[in-house]
Amino acid sequence: MPKFLLGWLLSLAANAIALVICWLLLPGFKLSFPIGFIVAIVLFGIFSAFFSWLVFKMLRDKGSSVVALTGLLSTFLALLLTSLLTEGLDIDGVTTWILATLIIWLISVLIWFIPGPWRNRRRESEAKKKD
């Protein structure tokens, strides 16, 4: 299995866990199971990957302090579009939006600390850049 696909599947699993945690903790965060949940996970994964790339490209030249916001902004945008385009995810209230964005972003950051083959790709590309 390609490393990119393995990394995306891990991210998809992390997003699924994060969405369920938000559903359990936040009263304004609603998921409809099972079909709506699956559609929401897939759409959120696609949007999250796309917005991470897009926001990083736009903010890359602004400095390292702004690039740190890439994850939060892309998570919020992915949540927003997923909520608008599917009935599997519904978020009510500003506080719920903020907390859901933070929880999902934090879980996605923490998941990358798990060792695995997806991390070797970054090391290989960094080693090629140094040569």
Image (cartoon, grey):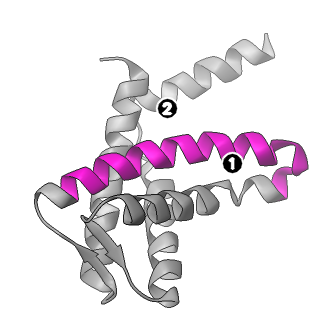
Q: Pinpoint residue 34: horizontal percent, then vertical percent.
A: 10, 59
- Quarter of the rendering containing residue 126: top right
Between 71 and 111, which is closer to the camera in this rendering?
71
The secondary structure making up most of the magenta span is helix
Q: Amino acid at mark 1?
A: Val
Between 59 and 3, which is closer to the camera in this rendering?
59
Q: Which residue is mark 1?
A: 55
The secondary element bearing badge 2 is classed as helix
Point out the stretch of residues depicted in magenta: 37-65
Q: Which residue is mark 2?
A: 119
In the displayed structure, does residue 24 sit left or right of residue 11? left
Residue 124 higher or lower than 95, as above or below? above
Residue 40 higher or lower than 11, as above or below? below
Residue 40 higher or lower than 8, as above or below? below
Q: Pinpoint residue 14: horizontal percent, then vertical percent.
A: 34, 53
In the displayed structure, does residue 128 sit left or right of residue 94? right
- The residue at 49%/49% (across/down) is 48
